[in-house]
């Protein structure tokens, strides 16, 4: 299916690895020119070079922390008028809420709620004026079914979700859609570190920890960044103009509810 977005411009945050990279690659495969952002210049440049080689699109790489005002200013200087915005950043650490400090909460809110809101604030009116915009926020299945040790994520991402529900309706008449993608378990560096911690805590091998988690997923496997990216590209396509304010769970059937 032709997504109808060749030649458009996208700003994809936290995209040197994992799910953000999957979104960048899938958009590039549709002919979208990219600005990709991550903190480590070397990894980011390597990703940018690979995407250019795979797809032939223009890829600008901006090494910065997207959760800071300076980082967002650098990203927007490289890509002031994106047609597509993919919001993403690292997830907050696990822990018991009794041990979370005020600063821990502020960091989680900056990363997983306020940075996406600031980037939407900077770009959405331009999208509306041009009559086309697609915003995708990478959140988490924790928004739909909270994960006990991820209180910071449950809270901060739910704040973003509630805000977006209202904003999406307000810009709908202008051709701009905003949707959230909710990953379940995907095979990225982020979950690799989780398995290391679980293996250590349960005194089992990392592979055993992986297998145990995999068995809890009806699909019998973890997701991969390519299938996540393809879902993102569809939401950014001309075909998804009537889909807005939605929360798409991509979790191999792990969420047990009927809807
Ligand atoms: P990952 O660790 O594989 O990749 C994270 C990417 O984000 C890297 O490119 C990193 O450089 C970049 N990054 C992190 N913080 C950044 C910042 N402040 N500024 C700029 N770039 C930054 O992680 P992932 O698995 O792709 O996860 C992406 C998001 O999805 C995270 O918020 C994570 O919590 C969430 N999530 C992931 C899963 C999963 O199974 N992988 C499940 C639920 C939620």
Image (spheres, rainbow, N blue to C red):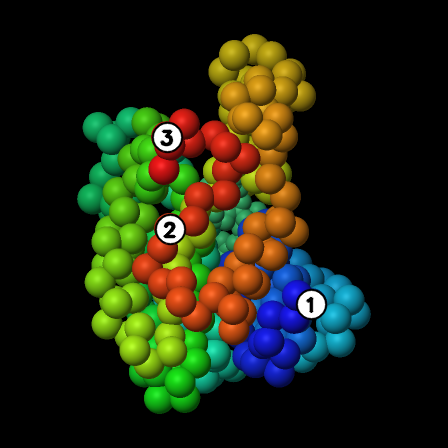
Instruction: Judge by depth and name the residue closer to the eye, 10 or 251.
Output: 251
| Residue in view at x 34 percent, y 33 percent | 145
Is 163 situated left or right of 192 in this image?
Answer: left
Q: Secondary structure at mark 3?
A: loop
Looking at marks 2 and 3 on the same chain, the residue that comes earlier in the sequence is marked by 2
Which residue in the structure is indicated by mark 2?
247
Q: Is residue 248 left or right of residue 4?
A: left
Secondary structure, mark 2, is strand
Mark 1 in CB contact with mark 3 (< 8 angstroms) = no
Above or below for 16 versus 198: below
Residue designated by label 3:
257
Marks 1 and 3, the one that precedes in the sequence: 1
Give the crowd class for mark 2: few <14, some 14-19, many >=20 residues within 10 Å.
many
Where in the figure is residue 237, as x and y percent of width and height?
A: 53, 69
Q: Residues within 10 Å of mark 3 (few under 14, many from 20)?
A: few
CB within 8 Å, label 2 to label 1: no
Nearest to the eye among marks 1 and 3: give it: 3
Give residue 116's position: percent from left, percent from top. Answer: 35, 63
Q: Residue 11 in the image: x percent, y percent?
A: 51, 72
| Label 2 to label 1: alpha-carbon separation | 24 Å
Q: CA distance from mark 1 to mark 3?
A: 34 Å
Mark toward the start of the polypeptide (2 vs 1): 1
Asked if residue 187 lies left or right of residue 156, the reply is right
Q: Measured along the vertical axis of the image, is residue 13 above or below residue 254? A: below
Q: Is residue 189 above or below residue 196?
A: below
Quadrant housing the C terminus: top left
Which residue is under mark 1? 29
What residue lies at 52% left-to-right and 21% top-to-bottom? 216
Q: Secondary structure at mark 1?
A: helix
């Amino acid at each position: 299916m032709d997504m109808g977005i060749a030649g458009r411009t996208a700003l994809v945050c936290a995209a040197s690895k994992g799910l953000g990279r999957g979104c960048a690659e899938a958009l590039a495969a549709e002919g979208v020119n990219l600005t990709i952002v991550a903190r480590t210049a070397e990894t980011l440049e390597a990703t940018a070079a690979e995407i250019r080689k795979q797809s032939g699109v223009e890829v600008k790489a901006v090494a910065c922390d997207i959760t800071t005002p300076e980082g967002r200013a650098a990203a927007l200087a490289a890509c002031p008028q994106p047609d597509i915005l993919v919001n993403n950043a690292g997830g907050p650490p696990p822990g018991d809420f009794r041990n979370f400090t005020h600063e821990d909460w502020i960091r989680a809110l900056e990363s997983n709620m306020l940075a996406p809101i600031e980037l939407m604030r900077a770009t959405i009116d331009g999208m509306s004026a041009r009559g086309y915009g697609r915003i995708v926020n990478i959140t988490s299945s924790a928004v739909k079914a909270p994960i006990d040790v991820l209180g910071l994520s449950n809270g901060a991402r739910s704040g973003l979700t509630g805000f977006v529900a209202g904003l999406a309706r307000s810009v709908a008449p202008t051709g701009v859609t905003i949707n959230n993608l909710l990953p379940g378990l995907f095979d990225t560096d982020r979950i690799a570190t989780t398995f290391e911690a679980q293996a250590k805590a349960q005194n089992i091998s990392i592979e055993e920890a992986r297998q145990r988690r995999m068995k809890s997923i009806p699909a019998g496997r973890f997701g991969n960044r390519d299938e996540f990216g393809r879902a993102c590209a569809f939401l950014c396509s001309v075909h998804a103009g009537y889909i807005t304010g939605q929360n798409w769970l991509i979790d191999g059937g792990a969420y047990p509810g009927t809807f």
